[in-house]
Amino acid sequence: MEIYQRIMKFCKDVKDKTKQTYVNNKSKVKPLLAESKTKITSAYSGFKERFKGIMNIDNKKTTYIAVGITAVLLVSVIGYTKNYSPIAYEIKMDGKVLGIVRTEDEFKEAVDAIKKEIKTLYGHEFVMPEDVEILEVKAKDDELTKTQDIIYNIKKQMDMKVKAYALVVDGEEIGCVKDKAIAKSILEEIKLSYVDEDTDYEAIDFKEKVNIEEVARGIEEIKDEEEILNFLIKGTDEEAIHVVEAGENTWTIAKSYGIPMEDIHAANPGLVPERLQIGQEISLIVPKPYLTVVTKEYVELTEEIPFETETQPTDSLYEGDKKIIAQGLEGEREIKGYLIKENGVEVDREVLEEKILKEPVTRVIAEGTKERPLTVATGTFARPTRGRLTSGFGMRWGRRHEGIDIGAPIGTHITAADAGRVSFAGTKGAYGKLVIIDHENGYQTYYAHASKIHVKQGDRVYKGQHIANVGNTGRSTGPHLHFEVRKNGVPVNPSQFVKY
Ligand SMILES: [Zn+2]
């Protein structure tokens, strides 16, 4: 191909490209192109004539140069028009850019699309916030935002504000629902949960100040009836469930979570601990209801009157001793009036009429004031000697061991475990040297295998009195104290009274 033709073709291509680039924006580019065309044509002729004269070159060469310069011009035009940015609008909400549109209508379209979507999906009226700014800017086509992206940005940045109804308890917003009827029905349901069909109610109210307020909220904040109801009743949306495993009971479960037993019961009303089953789910969250339902009901009832308890000091008993003089007995009365309950629990009553059917009988307890002599049993036992436990109570080598053995060196003091009267002091078969104290309260204590006895039968001894010394007399395999506690003559385990 001739070089000239190639240059002409290049010029044509450039022209076509320019046209093509702006075919979408004809109105703006057309006058520009027309202007450029005239300028380029006249420049081309001008160049051609001038070069022809000055440089005295032939027509063909002149053409090359002219075409070259023209091409450079064209390229400049393309560059200019390519950087040309027409008017557009930047939409900002809460200071954040939602997008750039060529016309404001495109933004309205996006808003309408959201309105329609919300209405269809949620039945809500979409409320566009007022903090939307529209700024005139310059933007090229490829800088514009697609409608779908604007919709997405609006949803994201405005948290999809919709009209909702908030339940407000003592100024604290508990949650919102999509319409007022749902909010009302939630409150109604809570009231009804403490109401009994057959009862005659004077009033059913909430103790707290409860309001339903119209608000604009993010779509994700809108809860359904069930959620709010649960939240109001439990006081939290926290969930903690324990699945019962083999061998567990409410006590072990409470212990494993470090929570009080009462909490397990409070969290699971109606739970029967004896009927706990493997796989059963129990809640670990104690409900703290947000709302207190206060009911006032009219009642006519017969009820017990609890008896009172009175104590009477008496010097016929030792200090710390008690004796019931008169058993208490409940009375009975008939009542007409109002019971005031909070969440089903009586907190107050307004008695209109009361008729006593039976007077209660006061329980009378005598409390001793007489100083207790040191030689009268206190009712508790102290360790009878120092040493360590060498043998416990119960079966041993096929025989019953009726006391405990405390190993200690010969001569170690044996002291009375409690005060009382020495009922035996001497040698008795396998016991060897033995002291028996009768505490005169049903208990007797035995001190056996002694090396030395310091009391005699009939002596009164005080608690802690030195009565004998540890020895190895009778059937004994080494120095120790054999200590027995008998209740009405029957040996019982001394370890329930003294610790070694
Ligand atoms: Zn023994």
Image: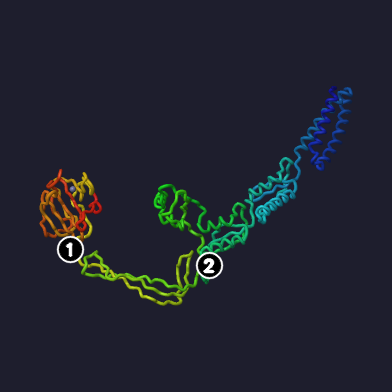
Residue with the mark numbered 1: 373
Image coordinates of residue 97 in percent, x first then y, are 66, 47
Image coordinates of residue 410 in percent, x first then y, are 13, 46
Residue 361 position by quadrant: bottom left
Mark 1: few/some/many CA within 10 Å (<14, 14-19, 20+) = few
Above-or-below relation of 73 to 408: above
Left or right: residue 128 compared with residue 313: right
Give amino acid for label 1. Answer: Pro
Image coordinates of residue 381 in percent, x first then y, are 22, 56
Secondary structure category for the residue under label 2:
loop
Q: Earlier in the sequence, mark 2 or mark 1?
A: 2
Identify the residue at horizontal 86%, vertical 31% (top origin).
44
Foreground mark, 2 or 1, reads: 2
Q: Residue furthest front?
A: 398
Identify the residue at horizontal 46%, vertical 52% (top origin).
284
Secondary structure category for the residue under label 1:
loop
Residue 176 position by quadrant: bottom right
Left or right: residue 86 compared with residue 211: right
Image coordinates of residue 219 in percent, x first then y, are 62, 53
